[in-house]
Amino acid sequence: MKKLEGKVAIITGAAVGLGKGIATVYAKYGAKMCLVDLLPEVEETAKELRETYGVEIVTYVGDVSNKDHMKDAAKKAKDAFGQVNVACCNAGVCRLAPFEEMSDEIRDFHIDVNIKGVWNTCQAVIPYMIEQGGGSIVIASSVTGDIVADAGEAAYAMTKAALVGLTKCLAVEYAGRHIRVNCSQLGYARTPMVEKMAIESNPDNPESAIQDIAVGVPMKRLADPLEVGELFAFLGSDEASYLTGSQIVIDGGSTLPETMSMGTN
């Protein structure tokens, strides 16, 4: 039996990038899914995964920052499959700007998607999880904010660090009701969001910005979204039954070196 067979998962931000990688791994392991995204391309992702893995998938085109949308998405999953076992709170945004020039609109955009989006998703699924006797929530935080940061990331760093606190509180609050809550802390993966950040960082040569990220990673590469999907699948499965409130760094070792110039290598 595949490790997610019999599980029903909601995955936000599932159309492209990390969300598609997570959904692909969940499909590989036999989960039924409700894929949520603001982009209508989520329908194409669902079609591709159905054809490749033969899994049952419904989709919901909606905005995670809208609480009613997330309630509707959770209900759609419950109505389609009878339960909601896992929520992968993946949807997120990042826009770079110098702090003194960062507009309230950019700040609030990060808060709305990165914090309120996760908040809304959790509030939408937890009642179903309580009713059925348990579940697992996996929140996509980041090494940014809680461990490291780069210039221009104030809004992103603030909101991603906030998710660590939310993870820990929900883990304590719902442990007695058999709901586990953990978060991933990803470094850089090759995704459309990172490619956009590279353009913002170096408009003349965005590819060099991505290559420079890899130089600072001991493994000398960015993550593949499928590798991140494997972590989300583990945390969503019964294999992680004694893990809750955990922060799991997945960054190829990028937060480990003290410098890039000292040492024997």
Image (cartoon, rainbow, N blue to C red):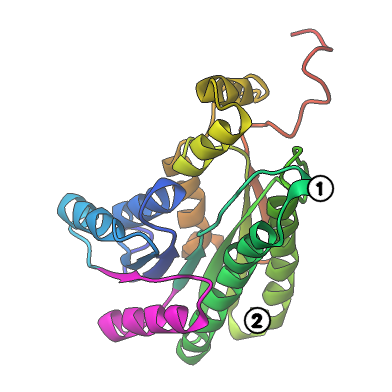
Q: Is residue 234 left or right of residue 74?
A: right
Count of number-bearing discs: 2
The residue wearing badge 1 is: 100
Labelled disc at residue 174? 2
Q: Is residue 144 above or below residue 158?
A: above
- Nearest the eye: 227 or 74: 74
Amino acid tagged 1? Glu
Furthest residue to the bottom? 131
Q: Is residue 66 magenta?
A: yes
Q: Residue at the location (22% across, 62% down)?
A: 55
The answer to whether any part of residue 126 appears in the image is: yes
Q: Is residue 99 left or right of residue 80?
A: right
In depth, the one of 212 and 11 nearer the eye is 212
The amino acid on which the numbered mark 2 sits, given as a three-letter code, is: Tyr
Relative side of 228 to 1, left or right: right
Q: Which residues are magenta?
A: 58-85
Q: Quadrant of the C terminus?
A: top right
Q: Position of residue 145 (x, y in %)?
A: 75, 50
Give x and y (percent) for residue 114.
Answer: 61, 62
Query: Which residue corresponds to the image point at 50% horizontal and 55% vertical from the top-left?
Result: 232
Classify 10 Å Cα crowding around label 2: few (below 14), some (14-19), many (20 and above). Answer: some
Secondary structure beneath disc 2?
helix
